[in-house]
Image: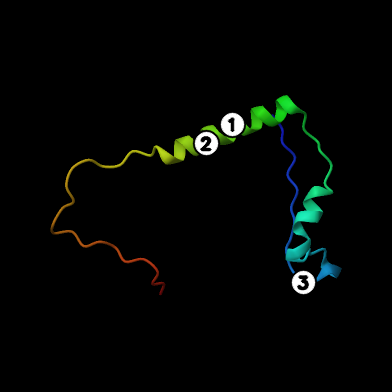
Amino acid sequence: VDVPVTDIVVGNDEEQGQVPLKKVRTKMLKLPRLLSGPQVTAANDRLRAMGDLMSNMPLPKGPMPKGMKMPRGGKMR
């Protein structure tokens, strides 16, 4: 199923095509409806299947090794 994608840039500079945050909902509701009912269902099923794949990632079994140091996140050099 080919699903059209619309980019909306949120910001305060309307001259550059940005949409203020307060007007995003209105902008989205004004977009044309390009998919029929069965196409929406098919796209939703595909997206749901991708979400299931990501949530069921295999994890290693067994206890954590005691001598191994855990990597720290957030520090960039």
- Mark 1, residues whose alpha carbon is within 10 Å: few (<14), some, or many (≥20)? few
User: Going 71% across and 28% down the picture, which residue do you hit?
Assistant: 39
Image quarter of residue 38: top right
How dense is the environment of label 2, judged by Cα within 10 Å: few (below 14), some, or many (20 and up)? Answer: few
CA distance for labels 1 and 3: 35 Å
Describe residue 71's horizontal placement relative to residue 43 as left or right. left
In the drawing, what numbered circle is on residue 37? none
Q: Are marks 2 and 1 in contact (CB under 8 Å)?
A: yes
The image quadrant of residue 13 is bottom right
Q: Quadrant of residue 69?
A: bottom left
Secondary structure beneath dot 3 equals loop
Q: CA distance from mark 2 to mark 1?
A: 6 Å
Question: Which numbered circle lies on residue 46?
Answer: 1
Q: Which residue matches tag 3?
A: 12
61 lies left or right of 34: left
Q: Mark 1 or mark 3: which comes first in sequence?
A: 3
Q: Is residue 58 left or right of residue 1?
A: left
Is residue 69 rendered to the left or right of residue 22?
left
Q: Which residue corresponds to the image point at 83% horizontal and 68% vertical from the top-left?
A: 14
Q: Point out the image quarter for the N terminus.
A: top right
- Amino acid type of the residue that numbered disc 2 sits on in the rendered structure: Met
Residue type indicated by callout 3: Asn
Residue picked out by circle 2: 50
Marked residue nearer the N-terminal end (3 or 2): 3
Residue occupying the point 75% across, 64% down: 22
Q: Position of residue 61 (x, y in %)?
A: 22, 40
Colouring = rainbow
Q: Residue at x 79, y 61 (%)?
A: 23
Label 2's element? helix
Real-space Cα separation, disc 3 to disc 2, in angstroms? 34 Å
